Image (tube, helix red, strand yellow):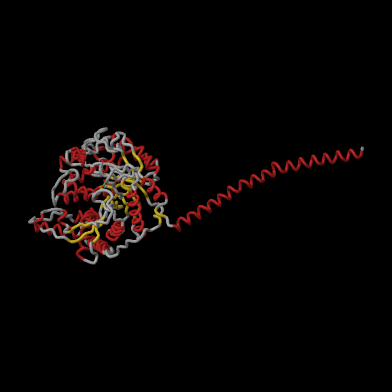
Amino acid sequence: RAGTMLRTGIRLLALALCVSAGGDFDWTKNEKTSFYYGTFPTGFSWGVGSSAYQTEGAWNTDGKGMSIWDVFAHKKGKISSNETGDSSCEGYYKFKDDINLMKEMKLSHYRFSVSWPRILPSGLRSEHVNEKGIRYYSDLIDLLLDSKITPVVTLYHWDLPQVLQEKYGGWQNASMVGYFNEFANLCFERFGNRVKLWITFNNPWSISVEGYETGEHAPGLRTRGSGAYKAAHHIIKAHAKVWHTYDMKWRSKQKGLIGISLTADWGEPVDVSNQRDVEAAERYIHFYLGWFATPLFHGDYPAVMKEYIGRKSGQQGLGASRLPVFSPQEKSYVRGTVDFLGLGHYTTRYVTQKNYPSGFGDSYFADRDLAELVDPKWPDPGSEWLYSVPWGFRRLLNFVKAQYGNPMIYVTENGVSEKMLCTDLCDDWRMQYFREYINELLKAVRDGVNVKGYTAWSLLDGFEWDEGFSERFGLYFVDFRNKNKPRFPKASVQFYKRIISSNGFPSQREVESWKRKAVETCSSSNQLLAADPLIGHMEMVTEIVVPTVCTLCILLSAVFFMFLLRRRL
Ligand code: NOJ
């Protein structure tokens, strides 16, 4: 009993320390400083990303089962121009070409996802393992490793087996926790000897809100105000279960890390001197990132979510909060199950307080009591929602550092799309976006945020979910009208490649010192080279001069002898 009390005490103390660490984030300190010249720490990992449904195509090939996205995209009116990911970039057939593109860019890692129904067509391991699907991922991993590119593998990038949706209601149902664990376990068993960085879920916010609240994404449900919270609850538990399985069964042999990829916009108070705006911005971030990060780092939902959703559920006459509750055992089960945090980030919003009266109806959005605004001056080169606000990236990274005890972070997604068909391939705005966002990342690293790698989104133009192929995020342009789906580099390929080769944006001083070092190495190698003429000279002395002089001497002596003999005669 004393031991339990002590442990609880230590936990509470740790939690208090963590929460107070959250106070470290200074809302008033938004330094929109000028460009920072400098480089990333040695070993910083540069990569690109993709996901199965967005790029693979081969939707019904080699024994693959249906996913919720196959079914959703085939329904009329769900996707812009009724496009589907049936063939997409044909990545399933062209992965060797794609790895060559990555090799040329000198990338250190490639993030891709495993399609669950490609390897488990009905979702269940007990029913059938599709060996052809396994072979595809296995070959992909092998070739990446041969090419010195580290595979970063996402287990769930939204393509749930359709059978699990139909039979159980997908993430609404607690049984998904066990099924996902079986699928993950199969991946560890077959690929874990070669994969060291695992991401359980990609962007669970989107799975929950767009899949179960607004219905813009598969499975297209509109269970306003409750389904999203339920789905998220099961996803958090599923993540934790996989982390524990890996920890108990695989970690000691395979020595990998298990993370999750959370995507979040930054929320900046409209007026930082107004406490209500600051609180609204805090809520915005807690309802976005904190919804998942706080249970995984601290063991429970953010206090502000519990308070707001609880109060509003009461006002709506519900007996219990629409936000599910973690039991004490569950709290300790989910807490601390992140070896690294994957962070996806694209854009920022200004946030201010706005009351949603209870008669407004249940909704995730109404629960937050806030309004989002944008500055009309912010560039918006691509998707409607994507404004380029680089400083928000540094703010978000510093918030994570303060709130979650400076965890190890991999940026798992960052990039920008283009609205129009960029056929001239001169994507200046993308280069500008990368330059500025990566620069803010560099500033965050200098602030002490523990970031180990950056993943540009994405390698190729792909199927952009409900937007179909109309929004292109790729570094490579894909001609989707041509059935061979040829790839063409946009200008940003060379640009990103330069950032990679110089590991950031070297300052004039760094460049000078590199030059000096290069000159020194050159001059020492010049000395080596200079040794060659010297050797040549020696050789000339021994091989030409000496024999010539000797021959001349002999000749002269002979002439001299002859002369003497003549005189005697
Ligand atoms: C996040 C998603 O994970 C990815 O699939 C998508 O392409 C990007 N956002 C851009 O919208």
Q: Residue 91 at x, y = what percent?
A: 31, 38
Quarter of the image with the C terminus is: top right
Say left or right for 221 vs 148. Answer: left
Quarter of the image with the N terminus is: bottom left
Which residue is rendered at x = 19% and y = 48% of the image?
Answer: 210
Tell which residue pokes out farthest to the top in this image.
62
Which residue is rendered at x = 55% and y = 49% of the image?
Answer: 525
Q: Choose between 328 and 522: the one closer to the eye.
A: 522
Res. 2 in view: no
Tell which residue pokes out farthest to the right in this image.
569
Residue 547 placement: quadrant: top right
Vertical position of residue 212 compared to residue 407: above or below: above
Say left or right for 319 vs 152. Answer: left
Say left or right for 535 vs 180. Answer: right
Q: Choose between 47 and 404: the one closer to the eye.
A: 47
Residue 366 placement: quadrant: bottom left
Say left or right for 404 vs 165. Answer: right
